[in-house]
Amino acid sequence: MSKLALVIDDDADIRSLCEHLLSQRGYRVDTAEGLEELARCPQRLDVDLILLDFSLGEFTGLDILEYLFDLKIDASILVISGCSHGVADRIIRYGNQHGLGMLGFLHKSKLIADLDRWLIPASSKPDTPTAEDLARGLAQEELFLVFQPKFDLSLNRVVGAEALVRWQEPSRGVMSPDVIIPLAEYHEMIVELTWQVLNLACRQLQRWRQSRWDLSLSVNVPAAWIKSANLFEDFDSLIDRYDIAPRDLILEVTESTTLGCLGYAKHVLAGLRQRGCRLSLDDFGTGYSSLMQLHRLTFDELKVDRSFISRIEQDKRAKAIALSILDLGHRLDMAVVAEGIETPEQHALLRAAGYDLGQGFWLARPLSAQDFDNWYQQLVERVKPALH
């Protein structure tokens, strides 16, 4: 089946050249002049490969990347431009910081000569797994967790981690949540997947408890799990099986999640809190029902979405929102967490502002279970001499 490509450039000659070159290489090609055209028809961005210019009239390639991030587009992106390498590096760094599939930079003068070497990694992208693949993966326990450390910003101390699911798919390699979660939701396997993730998380908490490590673990739970039958009985059974302190388990509800009946959601979430586990409202600021959820439902923690945190250095409005959410969270007696801390400047600003907790690549990247244990053990050993 032909792969889909989109060329975004305001130069008609370049669009025509790229369309010709990609068509010769088996792509079905669409072209666009810039952001205005795509904003009216976002489905055109659902492609395998994007060739992106930097200067696009009133907008830039950064505006396009921001839009791709907002839409959670999973495409390989090659920057094609006549701009300097410094400007191209800035675009690529921005894309990588936002988890986009940046291939690199190709100067327009080298399109004909060098395009092929950039298409090889794009072409080798694995095929999308099927529902049958996921069902087999769940049955054979191919899922595993990686752990992104979570820091107390005032004490500069690790207090826990967020569990992020991965899938070791035999023929495709390691698959990310961006592939796993939509597939599970579409084929109504998300509840089974969530229980398997919770099982892995509780097993990890048990190991940390046996090592006498006082760490919490956050796990994202979807609306379908909250509304599932026999939830309290199955949850109690899970906690008893691993003999962990429920307080060490933090259940994250994504703010944009459609909980449906808030009255029933309140009953379930209150029952989980009564059992001792903590609740977190994740990705706060990205949905439309934020304040209603905060008013009707009780949470222990508020996680500010990375889309605000990533802009606080250069965007006064993003900074104002991030600080306002901090004040709101504290007024509601919640710990406030900054997601996606990528620079020392962001870290310093958030710490000075009074953010309680933070996570992000600048502090620590997600680690496998073994790597996390080794990393944390080194931190423990480093702290011991200071206590004596």
Image (cartoon, rainbow, N blue to C red):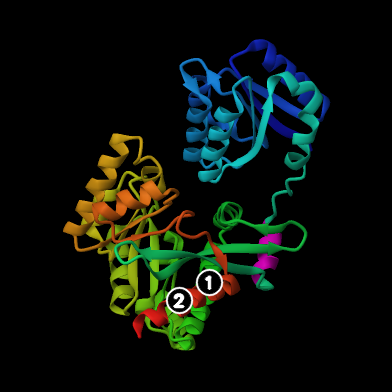
Q: Residue furthest left?
A: 331
* Residue at (41% x, 76% y) in the render: 215
Pointer 1 or 2: first along the chain: 1
Q: Is residue 192 left or right of residue 14?
A: left
Query: In this figure, which residue is indicated by the disc labeled 2?
Result: 382
Does the rendering let one see residue 305?
Answer: no
Q: Quadrant of residue 232?
A: bottom left
Query: In this figure, which residue is indicated by the disc labeled 1?
Result: 375
Q: Is residue 83 left or right of residue 350?
A: right
Is 167 magenta? The answer is no
**Looking at the image, is 353 positioned above or below residue 143?**
above
| Badge nearest the viewer, 1 or 2 | 2
**Circle 2 Cα neighbour tier, 10 Å, few/some/many (<14 / 14–19 / ≥20):** few
Q: Amino acid at mark 1?
A: Trp
Read off the magenta span. 131-138
**Looking at the image, is 93 positioned above or below residue 367?**
above
